Image (cartoon, rainbow, N blue to C red):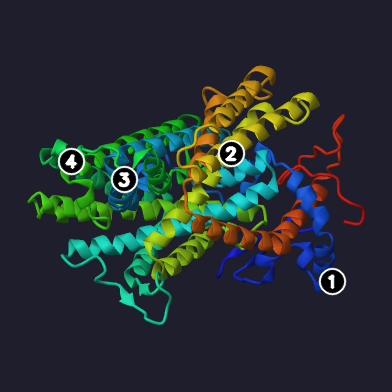
Amino acid sequence: MGMESEVPESGGGIRRRNCVCTKDDFLPEESFKSWGNYANALRQTPTRLIERALSRSNDEAELEAKSRSHHEMKKTLTWWDLIWFGMGAVIGAGIFVLTGLEASQDAGPAVVLSYAVSGVSALLSVFCYTEFAVEIPVAGGSFAYLRVELGDFVAFIAAGNILLEYVIGGAAVARSWTSYFATLLNFKPDKFLITAHGLAKGYNQLDPIAVAVCFIICIIAIRSTKGSSRLNYVASIIHIVVIVFIIICGLIKADTKNYTPFTPFGARGIFKASAVLFFAYVGFDAVSTMAEETKDPARDIPIGLVGSMVITTTVYCLLAITLCLMQPYQSIDPNAPFSVAFKAVGWSWAQYIVAAGALKGMTSVLLVGAVGQARYLTHIARTHMMPPWFSYVDEKTGTPVNATAVMMSATAIIAFFTKLEILSNLLSISTLFIFMLVALALLVRRYYVSGVTTNANRNKLIICLLLILASSIATAAYWGLSEKGWIAYCFTLPIWFSATAGICIFIPQARNPKLWGVPLVPWLPSLSIAINIFLLGSIDKDSFIRFAGWTGFLLAYYFFFGLHASYDTAKEFEKSKGWKNNIEEGNGTSNVVVSKDVPIAPVASGN
């Protein structure tokens, strides 16, 4: 791809090359200059891994990393844009597809409680994201936040799952777009799918329309962030009007008898549905990646993120109530629930309005997802954990062109082959895992600052965090394995409460938020950790197997490429800025902060 790229030189300067794309655009680091260098780097993998796992970035380093994209992104967004981006990112395929599936199979009319549980979990995560986004307004989102507080290694694993989340989410929405488009034209949902008999089941219904939609969205996202915001704004307004129509007209045809029984599948069904319905909230974290393009992050981000999530949760609950009042849960169609519900009550004409509204909503989700996922990849590439070619920002459009094109291409390929049912659970597990890590990172941010927190308080914090994680995992595991047991909860819940109270009472906060802070710390982030892990315990085994396979692939890439690239980049900038290692008193690790990367731990001789 013709472009002007940047590569650090040994002196810390920038070497520019015009209109060329070579190996150095992807692997410019010293470890990949020759096969001998690469072999030497592989031999040093254990030493380098320990260093990068213990290395933490800082706020200033993440902000300065923006300079590696050649051009800055344009600050054009306000809180009003962010609210509409937030709703556009979230209200889409989840509510129009999964509501019927979970109401009919897992929760019954109590699906409204499932949405409420998922909404509370998402809102807790929103608070955690907001504090980070205000103080570290960069495109990296949760990757940058985790890199600052939990180190490079954890951040990379999370980053891989973030990218997987966006690709799978976009593919799922693109497939649903085709189904609702067919419904709008009065065809069956699978009318435009092409069956390939030689492929495995679940991957053999090809969707060329989904590919075309991804291509169009890619072009829009590349041209302008503000333009994307305007299009999303218009689409979201139309979408909200349709949702209001569904709620009002649906309640006119409501029958309270359909709400009996309210919980046919019991509490277990409610939480099982809640874990799957978390898919419907995926996307709000894309708004945090737009902090770099926000005019006033301290004001706009809290209003945009929290406001959009409160509105979204309210809308979801009202739609769930409406659907279950229109039809008995046994009769709800799992593929097109709202359209079929209106047809069942004698308003067949309304199905076309529902289909049009769904298309508008899913278009917004795809657009905001394309914008968000490209910014994640851009910031990851700035650290050289991914090839720096992805970090290029176009001077004219102010958008990350390469990252957008590659991510939407991957989305289109998966959408072409893979059914929604296969995608939704894997998407939820990646999202819940990331949200749990962000809440954990917020506790670390508030209670541990190198050079401020004493060793005793640091050790207390580690113990309390381990107890919070262990008790949450034990609670989720017991819930998943025991159908009627309750004795274990008498141990796990008090341990979680005591560990959280221990942080609150015995460990002083080492850092106060500068501009906007999460309330009720440590209780709110600790509760976010517990709920996210609990919902993970309700997801099926096959999804965890796929998640483990993807994580294994990420580890292989990191050990062979990402680790050595980020290591060399850190060393290069340390050398160019002339930093020297300063050993903390009573601590065997260094606290070096380099200008454009991470604090550097001591390096073994010969590196």
The numbered mark, 2 or 1, whose residue comes first in the sequence reads 1
Q: Which mark is residue 474?
A: 2
Q: Badges 4 and 2: C-beta atoms under 8 Å apart? A: no
Residue 340: x %, y % from top left: 17, 55
Q: Helix or strand or loop: what does disc 4 sit on? A: helix
Q: CA distance from mark 4 to mark 2?
A: 37 Å
Q: Earlier in the sequence, mark 3 or mark 1?
A: 1
Q: Is residue 409 left or right of residue 156?
A: left
**Residue placed furthest toward the right:** 605
> Which residue type carries mark 1?
Gly
**In this figure, which residue is indicated by the disc labeled 3?**
233
| Residue 50 appears left or right of 525 | right
Instruction: Check disc 2 and report its element: helix, strand or loop.
Output: helix
Counting residues from the start of the chain, the first of labels 4 and 2 encountered is 4
Q: Is residue 308 visible?
A: yes
Q: Residues within 10 Å of mark 4 (few under 14, many from 20)?
A: some
Give the Cα distance between marks 2 and 3: 43 Å
As shown in the figure, which amino acid type bears the numbered disc 3? Tyr
Tell whether 566 sits left or right of 583.
Answer: left
Residue under pointer 4? 258
Q: Position of residue 267 (x, y in %)?
A: 38, 38
Q: Nearer the viewer, mark 2 or mark 1?
A: 2
Query: Dot 1: what SS?
Result: helix
- The mark nearer the N terminus, 2 or 3, is 3
Report the mark closest to the observer, 3 or 4. 4
Location of residue 334 in the rendering, given as x and y in whole percent from the top left corner: 27, 55
